[in-house]
Each structure stands twice: as structure tokens, then as C-alpha cells.
Image (cartoon, coloured by chain):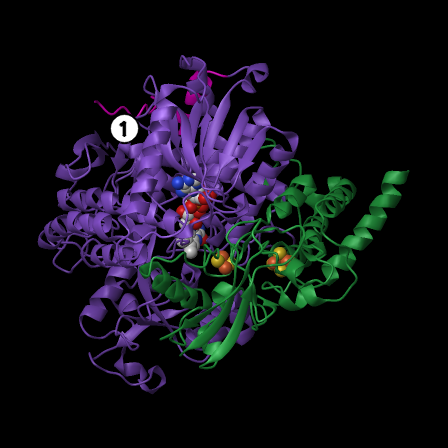
Amino acid sequence: MRIFLKVWRQATPRDRGGFVDYTAENISPDMSFLEMLDVVNESLIVKGQDPIAFDSDCREGICGTCGFLVGGVPHGPDPGTSVCQLHMRRFKDDDRLVLEPWRARAFPVLKDLVVDRSAFDRIIQAGGYTSVNVGGAQDANLILVAKTASDKAMDSAACIGCGACVAACKNASAALFTSAKVAHLAFLPQGQPERATRVVAMVERHDAEGFGSCSNEGECEAVCPKEIPITNIAHMNREYLRAMLVTRD
Amino acid sequence: MQLDSKTPGGPLAEKWDRHRFESKLVNPANRRKYTIIIVGTGLAGASAASSLGELGYNVLSFCIQDSPRRAHSIAAQGGINAAKNYQNDGDSIQRLFYDTVKGGDYRSREANVYRLAHLSVNIIDHCVAQGVPFAREYGGLLDNRSFGGAQVSRTFYARGQTGQQLLLGAYQSMMRQVEKGSVKSFSNREMLDVVLIDGQARGIVVRNLNTGAIERYAGHAVLLCTGGYGTAYYLSTNAVNSNVTAAWRAHRRGAFFANPCYTQIHPTCIPVSGTEQSKLTLMSESLRNDGRVWVPRTSGDKRPPKQIPEAERDYYLERRYPSFGNLVPRDVASRNAKAVCDEGRGVGDSGLAVYLDFQDAIERLGDEVIRGRYGNLFDMYSKITDDDPYSVPMRIYPAIHYTMGGLWVDYNLMSTIPGLHVLGEANFADHGANRLGASALMQGLADGYFVIPYTLAHYLGSATLPAVTTDHDAFKASEAAVQERIDLLLSVKGSKTPRQLHRELGGLLWDEVGMARNEAGLRKTLERIPQLRDEFWQNVSVPGPKNNLNKNLEYAGRVADYLEFAEVLTLDALHRQESCGGHFREESQTPDGEALRDDANYSYVAAWEFQEVGKAPHLHKEPLTFEYVKPSQRSYK
Ligand SMILES: Cc1cc2nc3c(=O)[nH]c(=O)nc-3n(C[C@H](O)[C@H](O)[C@H](O)COP(=O)(O)OP(=O)(O)OC[C@H]3O[C@@H](n4cnc5c(N)ncnc54)[C@H](O)[C@@H]3O)c2cc1C
Ligand code: SF4
Ligand code: FES
């Protein structure tokens, strides 16, 4: 296969950046999208040119490191698939693809397709945990958790923190990411003691980091590689309202 | 130097309690005066950062990824063991201990393994309190499954994402300490040297991967939690940024490297396709609970699987190992897959694959049950291969997965460099020559949550640690050396990419130091590695800036370290003229082709001391004694 690429190149965070054309030749349909980019980069390195910067680690859809826009869509055209799991058989010979980094105020571009997502860490830091120290826990089976609650918690906890939801949102909101953690812990008995303070702290941090607010467009859900449903956001909003009432008394 | 494992005296079951009692403590008010550097944020590093942060130490945490949450541990699928005996099926601490020593083919320290089994139960309690969404039964109790050949159900799991959920639990606890100010998190930093002052580990030098700046950090102790070296083989199931660099740099500074030849090859991975593949994907071992492994009876049979009648299939694991069948340990399953492929009975285009067939299980239990158990794995498989495992058997083949070898540590997890502690996969300690499924997560968390808080306090309480700053000459010298090496990499301006050279090294190691090893092949490899290394330094191409984000430069540095490390890996495999666990020497096998140990000559830990690049390291031996488990020939027949 041959693929024509238009790739965003930006040397440093302060650079203006722009698109550069590349041709990926001899691509096998069994390659992953990132392996196709590896091939392009190998040809640049041999010529002594700076390869295209993109990030990845697990290359199996679980670490959340990879991610950029393929033809304007975060992680590319396959639903429920991170770009490292996207395969070239999905494309046709001579396809033209535009690759761009996540675009969001809270995610400044570092280089080419790599952005700074540390704002996500700071949202978790604000309250995405149960405050238990090592050592004091009771026997695990003393906490009963209904299977349905545990399954729902796991559905939300599956978020990989990739940032595609933000990139897809016209408001650059991180509501889906934030709500997935709020919901995970709200479903479980272990999350109850801090249920109110957690959601308030996380939502406030979300806003302070420069993410926009959610206007229910649903773009996030559509691109999420883990198919985290938008009902999490509604859940978070309910939790937030409840918290406002609880903390007011 | 005499290796002292510092194993406490007394009866096995009491050693850890006794050791904790005899260890020094650090007064709570003094803890914040101690700066602890933790490199790595996988299960080992993140759990250590959170537990030490909670105790009040001043913790500096480093990782390569752009967030601590992305460490390679995130990819673990199957589960974590604990001797809870919730299923009433005969499990106990003693049994987990016994299984682990036996599974490791009697090449681990009894006292360490017992401690691990003992702490396993506390791990589950803590993780549940954190809100890790483990699988549940309808009554609300925790569910368990049997994993990797264990005859009891002691594995706790969170769908096929156990590592992710455990790591997020540890990461979240660590971030809670970041918010409190006791932990400072430094992402996008690669450790390139350990700094020794008066022989003690007192700091690290890192490269800021976003800006290219070389940075120095000083502390009272350094904890390496930097994972395994599976990516030495180029293709492996490990994340692509996994590396030996941190461990290797420490080794060069005096930390002994133990048992590097103990590498684990996982039997159920998606086979290699094409030449540009960048990594291999694991299909969780849990699949062997319901899938049956087979190849055609006759070599060269290229019919599609459905057209091969039952009588012409060879369910070779069930045939050779009637009592364990498809659930034999990893090393046994992998070697058998290689053997049938060597006989020409492998399947798929390359002939390097065997079938893992779910037909019987689907007929017995129905599509839905199978989907519930393995849905996400089946999806992952079809995304990669474009095949549907519900209707066509999976094709699988062994791949490098885990490394039991690592930096030598004593019972306190301290290396041969005072103050340098090593946790998780990066150390060599608990799994002997072969790790059982679902035991790495257990070890990483035991080390970080429950062992290091005690043993580190003892070190801090007993060592003399004068104040140092990063202006010390040792820091300057280390930074200069790091900078010089980076400049050297950039200056070669050759015509081969680091990936090409890495692929070449990996291919060599896989062929000669992989599933089966022999003297001639190992000797040839020892000649070939220095040639490859020379070629690297004469012909590598590393374009792009040094004072900015440059992934290819990072990668080149890691490949350069692998080209040094590969020699001790091969040398260790050559010197150990017995087969044990993941190390199979063709010269040492039973008449029916099983691994043959040689306890009379090799019942020791091989710990290698660095000399200089290209010069053979010195071998030190830590004898292994077995007081509680009598070594026997492993048999899974
Ligand atoms: C696909 C897969 C599935 C697995 N499934 C299971 C399972 O089901 N059960 C089980 O028990 N085990 C499993 N394992 C094994 C287990 O996941 C690992 O052994 C374990 O997670 C290792 O944890 P760790 O904390 O030691 O290191 P890692 O998680 O590898 O973390 C290493 C850390 O060190 C950092 N680091 C590395 N080098 C440097 C450097 N030079 N400078 C700075 N930072 C550095 C990295 O950034 C990272 O944060 C699996 C492994 C794989 C590959
Ligand atoms: S919610 Fe989905 S898209 Fe957003 S960070 Fe999580 S996994 Fe990525
Ligand atoms: S590289 Fe890990 S999710 Fe894509």
C-alpha cells in the first residue's frame, strides 16, 4: 500500500508549526498505524532528518499514551480503537490522511503530534482516590459489593486517560475523563465517605486547568477508545448537585 | 566481595515478623528530613511512592512516560495471586509459598518467597480499600479464578485489565500524596546515572525528555523500580519504552546483576507477522483455562483448521501432560510449542504458530459465557489479526514476556550499592528461574506497599548519611559523562537506524538465547554482540536536536545499553550448564526432552560484577539452601 500523509510539524511549544507532506510506501495492510509511522520515520532517520514525534508505549490500547487526530478524528476512524490498535487494512491504497495533535488550551503542543496532558494528573490529584493509607485495611471480603455495582464501576474505571474526549469536544471539556473517575468511585461503597468532597474538588480542578464546560454534544463518547458512555457525565452532574446540597448543610 | 543475603534467622514463618521487630525505625518527625528518590511508577514504584509518602518521607518520583499512570504495569491482564483461600479449595500461605518455589524451579530464596506469600493477603485488602473494582460474585464477595496452572483458585482479577486497575489504584494513592506535598512527581524523565558519594547511592542524573535538559537530584536513598529487560529481544510483549538503561547504569556503578539468563517466554502471544512489527501482543494465559492447544498430527498439513478432522489433530499438551494438560506452566508450554513447530507441524503462513481452540468450550458453555470471560481479549485478537476467534481457532506463539533476572538484592531489597534499593521486576529476587502467572503484580505491590517501608527505615536509621547537595563533584562528573555520551550518539551520523540495530540484536538473542540454548550458539552470540556494538557506534544515525524532545535519541541510548547488557545475558546462559525454569540448555534434558536441573552444581544465584565494556564480568555466587521445600524434578505429567 501507499499512503499520502499531511503531518503537523512543530519543533517546539513556541513554534508556529505547519503541515508537511510525506509518502508512506510499501505499507502492509497488517501493520498498525503506528508501525506505518515507524516506517516513515525510519526513512527520515536514514536521511539524517528529524523524525515525526509521536508518543506510544503499550501499543495495545491500554496505557493511553498514543493519540492524535487522523483525518480530524481522534484515534482515527475505527470506533472503540486507540490509534495504536488501528490497522492499515482499514485504509485504501493512495488514501490521503491528515495527522494533527490534540488541540485544546489545556493540552499545549510539545512537539509535532505530542501534547502535554499533565492537567489530567492534576485532576486526579484533586480527589480521584479513596483516602486510605497502607496498613489499615480490613479483610477484603468484609466489604460486600453487588456484582452490578462492581461491573458499573469497572466500566467507568476502564478509562485510559488518553485525552481523545477533550480533543473531540468543541469546548475542549474533560468532562468525560473526570466523570469516569467520579462515577467509578461513586458506584462503590469504598468511595462513599468522600463522595461529596471528591466530585467538587475534581470539577473545580477541571475548570481551573482551562478545560471547557460540557454542552452535551456527545462527541467525546463517539471517539473514546474505551467507549466510556456519556451517562458518566450525567452521573457526575448529579453527584455534583448532591454534593452542593450535602456540603451546604 | 561476599554476598550476604541478610536473611533473618528463626523459623521460616516467623522470619519477617522477627526482622520487622529487629529493624530500626525512623521517628515520624524526622521522616520528612529524608529525601527518597524513586525511579519508576509501575506497581512497584507507585506503591512505594504512596506508602513512603503516607509515612511522611519527602519522595521524588520519576518516570519516562508523560504520566505515572502509564507505566508498563498497566498492561497486565490476567490477575494477581493471594493466599486468601476464599474459595475453600485448600489454599494457604504455605501452599502459595510451595507453588512459587517449585514453579521457580528451586532457584529462589525460600525466605523471600515465604514473605511474598505471607504479604499477598494484605495486598488484596489494601487494593479493595482503594476501590480497585475486582470481579465479584453475585453475593458481593470477591471472585477468583485459577490461573497459569495453579490447582487452586487464588487469582483476583478485574476483567482482563487487572494491571490497569491495580496501577491506577497505586497511582491515585500516589497522586493523593502529590496533592499533600509529600511526593513530587517528575514525568518525562529518564534516569541515566546513579550518583555515588562515599560509596552510597545519593542521587540520580536524568534527562528531561521534553526539553533535553540534564537534571540532578540528590537524596538519602534511591529506589529503582524500573521494570524488566524483555525488550532486549526487540520483539516482546513489553511496552516499547521498557528498557534496561536504569538497571544497567546502576550495574556499571557497582550493583551486581543476578541471573540475567532467566527470561520468561509466554506461550500465548499473537504470532509475528511481517518485518516491521514493533511489538507482540499477549493473549492472557487465562485463555488456556478454556482453550485447547493443538497442531496437525502430520507435518506440512496446511489445510484450514476446520478441515482437519479430530483424529488428525494432536492436542500435544493434553497428550504429554495428562494431569495438567493445557495448564502446564509457561516454560513447559512454550518449549512444547517450539518443539512441534520445529517438527514442521506449526500452523499459519510462517509455520511458527499453534492453535488455541475454543470450539469445545463454546459448544459446552455457549458464545455468551465465553464472551463474558474473554470478550475483550477476543476483540483485541480480531483487531490485530482480522480473524474471528469465535469461529476460527486463535493462532498463538511464544514471545518474550518477563524477566526473572535483575539487579541482585538482599532480603531488604538493597543492591550491592548501599542505599540503592531495587523493587519489582527490576530485581531478581522472588521468582527463581520461572515466574508463575499472576505473581509479578503480587511481588511489585508487596515490595512497594509492605516491604520497603520497613527495610528502608532500617537503612536510614542505621547508615551514616552526611548532607550532600547536587553541587558535589560526583554529580558534576556524572552529568558530564551523561552529556558526553549523548553528544557521542549525535555525532556518529551514520546510516543505520537504532531500530535496525535493535532488531538485529533482538533476532540474534531470540534465536540463540531464547527458548532453547546451546553452547555453540551462545559462543557465537558472544562473538557477534561486540561486532554489533561496534557497528552501532560507527554507523548509527541519530538526527534531531539534543536540547528538545527527541524520541529517536532516547531510543538510541537504550539500544546502546542493550548492546552492552546482551553480553552478560549470554554469558550467564553459557555458564549455567543446566536447564532450569525459563533457561533451557539443550545439553541438559531428560530422555523425554524435559528440562534437567543440576542441583549439585548450580543451586546458586549467579551475581555478575561489572568490569568494563567488552571485558567479562566477575561471577559471584550466592548459594541457595532449601530447608522447607525439598527440590525435586518438576513434573506436570
Ligand atoms: C502484556 C503483559 C501482561 C502481564 N500480565 C500479568 C498478569 O496478569 N499478572 C502478573 O502478575 N504479571 C503480569 N505481567 C507482568 C507484570 O505486568 C510486570 O512484571 C510488572 O507490572 C512490572 O512492574 P514494575 O513496577 O516492576 O515495572 P514497570 O511497570 O515496568 O514500570 C517501570 C517504570 O520504570 C520507569 N522507568 C524505566 N526506565 C526508566 C529510566 N531509565 N528512567 C526513569 N524511569 C524509568 C518507567 O517509566 C515505569 O514507570 C504482565 C506483563 C506483560 C508484558
Ligand atoms: S474518557 Fe475515553 S477518550 Fe477520554 S481520556 Fe478516558 S479513555 Fe480517553
Ligand atoms: S500506545 Fe498504549 S494505548 Fe496506544
Query: From the viewer's perspective, is residue A202 above or below residue B144?
Result: above
Tell me how many marks there are. 1
Q: Residue at x 25, y 49 (%)?
A: B581
Tell me if residue B561 is in the magenta stretch.
Answer: no
Answer whether residue A5 is visible to the viewer in this image: yes
Question: Position of B121 compared to A24: left or right?
Answer: right
Amino acid type for the residue under numbered disc 1: Gly
Write the start and end of the magenta stretch as one range: B1-25
Question: Position of A78 compared to B268: left or right?
Answer: right
- Percent from the top left, x then y, of residue A23? 42, 72
Question: Position of B508 compared to B371: left or right?
Answer: left
Q: Residue at x 57, y 46 (%)?
A: B168
- Percent from the top left, x then y, of residue B356? 37, 71
**Snapshot quadrant of residue B395:** bottom left
Is residue B545 or residue B187 the one in the foreground?
B545
Q: What is the drawing colour of chain B? A: purple
Residue, disc 1 = B254
Q: Chain of mark 1?
A: B
Is residue B585 or residue B372 the one in the foreground?
B585
Crowding around mark 1 (Cα neighbors within 10 Å: few <14, some 14 to 19, many 20+) is some
Quarter of the C terminus of chain A within the rendering: top right
Tell me if residue B9 is in the magenta stretch.
Answer: yes
- Percent from the top left, x then y, of residue B134? 58, 51
Answer whether residue B412 is visible to the viewer in this image: no
Q: What is the drawing colour of chain A? A: green
**Snapshot quadrant of residue A233:** bottom right
Quarter of the N terminus of chain A within the rendering: bottom left
- Percent from the top left, x then y, of residue B380? 48, 67
**Looking at the image, which residue sits at the far right?**
A249
